[in-house]
Image (cartoon, rainbow, N blue to C red):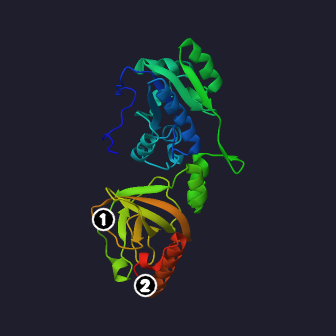
Amino acid sequence: MSLPAHLPGLDGIHLPPRPLHLAIGMFDGVHLGHQAVIESAVHTARRCDGLAGVLTFWPHPSAVFHPAERTPMLMSPEMKARVLFRLGVDAVIEQPFTPAFARITAQEFLPHLQRHLPQLAGVYVGENWRFGAGRRGDVALLLAEAGTHQVSVVSVPRMQYNGEPISSTRIRDGLKAGRLEEANMLLGYSYFAEGEVVSGRRLGRTLGFPTLNVPWQPELQPRHGVYAVRIAGERMPAALPGVANYGLRPTVGPAGGPLLEVHVLGECPLSTGSRVTVEWLKFLRPEQKFADTEQLRAQIARDRAAAVAFFRLPDNRVIS
């Protein structure tokens, strides 16, 4: 989906005059718990010929209140918007989280929304959502204020996985530790990276394993290492299986920053300049430094074999 160059905030949003059902939250990662809130707004909007919207924020409030300890985000605003639109949302409002916005009191919050969104009909939040200056507002206060302002409120219970609440923090911890399958379960989809393939030093080709090089430096960096992945380009009918290294390449560095390198397990139609999406499926091993390129070549061959086994590919699907 093609997105606007800049997602509007409350001051710049203009929506059709239809009832607006608005999910509100940071929604970093748009995990299963977030999806339950958003899908509730989408479902209601569809039943009453209304609009389903999402009000989200950038940057994270920690950037305003604790800039030295800013919470690293799982995804960029553009990636978040792409996932939100896939859920059937009609509009994404990305409100800049500034000191002035943070000073809006909990009691002023709904009137503030209504001044910018006069068609607001319903607000959808998680049961633990907090809002307003000092985070003094909660769902109980929202319900009390909503009647006065003729806005309905839907509070969605937190979802659990393995007996613990699903949260963005839990997903961050999983990605940093290489617990990719757990992170993907919490997300409800495969963690992914996006970027444009760039030309590299062609070391992979020299070693017998050509790669697609994708500069990608998210705020929250997954554990450096080797992964089984799928990679897709624009207008491709299906994603291709591959094995990827994400990290600083200590054996052949120096690297200016972490680089995502993908070796496709089969014929590859992608090349420099291709815009790609890489889905991360399984963590195979941590990044390590080898004594020489021959040791590196041997390990890459083992990594490739591990990815082939993961995908259960027949021999005729794989280039030897």
Secondary element type, mark 2: helix
Question: 191 and 288: which one is in front?
Answer: 191
Question: 116 and 22: which one is in front?
Answer: 22
Residue 169 seen in the figure: yes
The relative height of residue 107 versus residue 53 in the rendered view (above or below) is above
Other residues around mark 2 within 10 Å, as few (<14) / some (14–19) / many (≥20): some
Instruction: Please identify the quarter of the rendering in which residue 266 is found.
Output: bottom left
Give coordinates of residue 105: x percent, y percent. Answer: 54, 22
Image quadrant where one finds the N terminus: top left
Disc assigned to residue 198: 1
Residue 247 seen in the figure: no
Secondary element type, mark 1: loop
Query: Mark 2 and mark 1: span between their CA atoms?
Result: 22 Å
Q: Is residue 106 left or right of residue 116?
A: right
Instruction: Please identify the quarter of the rendering in which residue 285 is found.
Output: bottom right
Residue identifier under label 2 = 293
Other residues around mark 1 within 10 Å, as few (<14) / some (14–19) / many (≥20): some
Give coordinates of residue 15: x percent, y percent. Answer: 36, 25
Please name the residue shown 31% across and 39% down the image.
Answer: 4
The relative height of residue 37 versus residue 21 in the rendered view (above or below) is below
The relative height of residue 298 versus residue 73 in the rendered view (above or below) is below
Q: Residue furthest right?
A: 163
Please name the residue shown 29% across and 68% down the image.
Answer: 199
Give coordinates of residue 295: x percent, y percent. Answer: 48, 86
- What type is the residue that disc 2 sits on? Thr
